[in-house]
Amino acid sequence: MRDPSAVVDPEFVDRETPDRSADARTSGRHTPLRSSVSSNDIVRYVPQIFRRYEFDYTRPDSIRRRIPSETAYELSDWEADAIGLSDSRITVGDCVEFTKALTERDVRAFAMASGDTNRLHLDDEYARATRFGRRIVHGTLVGGVISAALARFPGVTIYVSENLTFLSPVEIGDRVTAICEIIEDIGRDKYQLTTDVVDSKGERVIEGQAVVLIDDSREA
């Protein structure tokens, strides 16, 4: 299995406005990503001077439905919703959203589990002297909420590849939502998805794409 990667567009800082080409307006995403680096090498976030993309993930409540849990456990303050997801098969346009708060406890547990004890996330005095002015959530912890959304697709979801762009930091304690939508059926149980995360204000903090393998749970 390939390691997930993070992607940064080096031209992004110099752009005055988001790309308004026909393709960009149609897709709601920016021009092709560049400069792939391993997520294990990411120690800084994209600077906050980056402009946020216009992004509207709002969908009518009438087309949402709660997902029956196939996971090992759920907590009462987690939310998982589906759009589409026929009981018979997964199709293009199916979408899962997963929402949870990223708490102080989550940040410290992630630092211990991953070994990422960067003081930006753990030391208030140190973080105040950085460009952010305060502690923020690990980027890979925010991206981990994408994994939680993928786990709510029916069956057994296995990562094949993922590319992420970190657009802005997340405050400790903020409630974030991962939005994963099937955009292509590649064949042989593989699917390509968009993998975005928005904060509690509805502003996109991560955008990405992934390829996953989804096995029928009855075959697991």
Image (cartoon, rainbow, N blue to C red):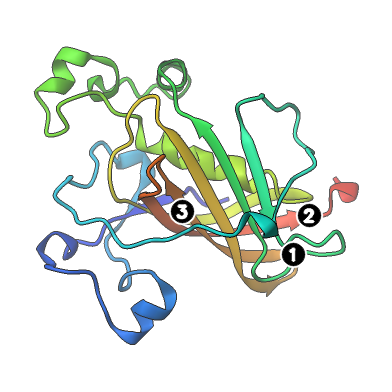
Dots 1, 2 in contact, CB < 8 A = yes
Q: Is residue 203 above or below residue 40?
A: below
Q: Which residue is mark 1?
A: 189
Task: State which tag comes first along the sequence, 3 or 1.
Answer: 1
Q: Which residue is mark 3?
A: 196
| Residue 39, quarter of the rendered image | top left
Q: In terms of depth relative to the viewer, which is nearer, 60 or 204?
A: 60
Task: State which tag comes first along the sequence, 3 or 2.
Answer: 3
Label 1, secondary structure: give it. loop
Find residue 73 and report its horizontal and vertical position in percent. 73, 26
Identify which amino acid the numbered label 1 is placed on: Asp
Label 2, secondary structure: give it. strand
Identify which amino acid the numbered label 2 is placed on: Asp
Q: How many marks?
A: 3
Q: Nearer the viewer, mark 3 or mark 1?
A: 3
Q: Is residue 45 above or below residue 92?
A: above
Q: In terms of depth relative to the viewer, which is nearer, 28 or 105?
A: 28
On-image quarter of the C terminus: top right
Dots 3, 1 in contact, CB < 8 A = no
Find residue 122 and report its horizontal and vertical position in percent. 29, 17
Tell me how far mark 3 sits from mark 1, CA to CA: 22 Å
Find residue 26 and report its horizontal and vertical position in percent. 42, 80
Q: Which residue is mark 2?
A: 215
Residue shown at 85% from the left, 59% from the top: 87
